[in-house]
Image (cartoon, grey):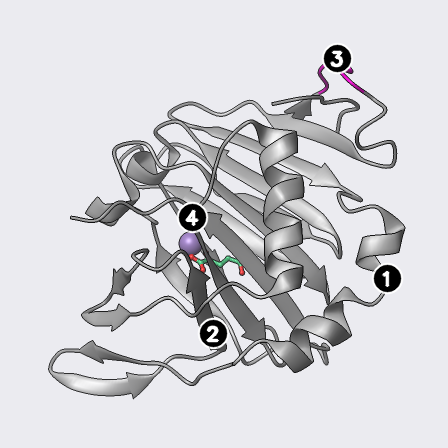
């Protein structure tokens, strides 16, 4: 990763590298076993961030996906869309997603995250949480096409929502709760997807829309 700074509860601050590339951001590294987790605040420069929520709300081809659970097709509680290189297809709970061709804002964000993180991506899963009843249930991003130790970069825009992680095997580990604010970038790497599950729970609070973009690299399998 290019640069990191500052600290928050449960996290440790690291040192600056190349401050000229992302002058506005600050980041914290969560010291957890079995994986790596970094949260960067104010990631995108304001000129890019300013109109992005409206732009993505209007330009992404949002779909209501269905997944099969116990033989039944059910609507997932959010809208989503999968963009990527031509052969970057993805399977999730029995549903196959064919990548839509990249659109300009998604490519520009991809390039900024690649510059920052020193990782490359060939696809992005976009999620739209319309209100507090939209959510994503406990899961890990551990599908075989994501490779052995997937590096996933997750950009949040709009309404702040709670993100939770729990260890899959070590029940003595406390659940981690963090809020993902507008324009924050969560980097998940190492063995995190094998040992930890994550979710965005529903909330009864009156909350506005949130867009989350998870950049990934999928392999043809
Ligand atoms: O919305 C988020 O922050 C997480 C989304 C997520 O975990 C996923 O799409 O796999
Ligand atoms: Mn996930």
Q: Residue at x 19, y 77 (%)?
A: 69
Q: Earlier in the sequence, mark 1 or mark 2?
A: 1
Q: Considering only order in the chain, which callout, 4 or 1, is on the residue closer to the N terminus?
A: 1
Q: Secondary structure at mark 4?
A: loop
At 52% from the left and 80% from the top, the residue drawn is 61
Ligand 2 is found in the corner quadrant, namely bottom left
State whether the magenta stretch is mostly helix, strand or loop: loop
Left or right relative to 41: residue 58: left
Asked if the magenta segment contains residue 208, the reply would be no
- C-alpha separation, residue under disc 1 versus residue under disc 2: 22 Å
State the image quarter where residue 128 is shown. Answer: bottom right
* Image spot of residue 127 (x, y percent): 52, 69
The disc placed on residue 122 is 4
Decide which of tag 4 and tag 3 comes sooner along the chain: 3
Check whether the beta carbons of the residues at disc 1 and disc 4 lie within 8 A of each other: no
Q: Are the residues tagged 4 and 3 within 8 Å (C-beta)?
A: no
For the residues bearing labels 3 and 2, Cβ distance under 8 angstroms: no
- Residue lying at the far left of the rendered structure: 71
Residue 49 sits above or below residue 133 on the image: above
Q: Is residue 168 above or below residue 29?
A: below
Label placed on residue 50: 1
Is ligand 1 closer than 8 angstroms to the Cβ of mark 3? no
Q: Residue at x 66, y 69 (%)?
A: 210
Q: Quadrant of residue 68?
A: bottom left
How far is disc 2 from disc 4 in space, using C-alphas? 17 Å
The CA span between labels 1 and 3 is 28 Å
- Mark positioned earlier in the residue sequence (3 or 2): 3
Q: Position of residue 214 (x, y in %)?
A: 51, 53
Quick check: is 14 in the magenta stretch?
A: yes
Determine which residue is flagged by label 2.
80
Residue 201 shows in the view: no
Q: Residues within 10 Å of mark 1 (few under 14, many from 20)?
A: few
């Amino acid at each position: 990763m290019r640069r990191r700074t500052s600290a928050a509860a449960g996290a440790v601050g690291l040192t600056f590298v190349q401050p000229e590339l992302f002058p506005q951001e600050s980041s914290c590294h969560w010291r957890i076993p079995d994986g790596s987790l970094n949260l960067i605040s104010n990631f995108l420069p304001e000129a890019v961030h300013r109109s992005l929520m409206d732009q993505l709300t209007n330009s992404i081809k949002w779909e209501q996906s269905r997944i099969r659970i116990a033989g039944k097709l059910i609507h997932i509680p959010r809208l989503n869309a999968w963009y990527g290189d031509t052969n970057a297809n993805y399977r999730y709970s029995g549903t196959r997603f064919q990548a839509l061709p990249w659109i300009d804002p998604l490519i520009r964000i991809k390039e900024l995250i690649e510059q920052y993180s020193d990782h490359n991506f060939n696809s992005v899963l976009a999620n739209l949480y319309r209100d507090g009843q939209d959510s994503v249930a406990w899961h890990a991003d551990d599908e075989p096409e994501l490779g052995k130790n997937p590096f996933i970069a997750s950009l949040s825009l709009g309404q702040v929502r709670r993100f939770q992680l729990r260890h899959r095997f070590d029940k003595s580990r406390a659940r981690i709760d963090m809020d993902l604010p507008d324009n924050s970038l969560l980097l998940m790497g190492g063995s995190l997807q094998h040992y930890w599950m994550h979710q965005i729970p529903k909330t009864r609070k009156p909350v506005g829309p949130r867009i989350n973009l998870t950049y990934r690299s999928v392999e043809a399998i």
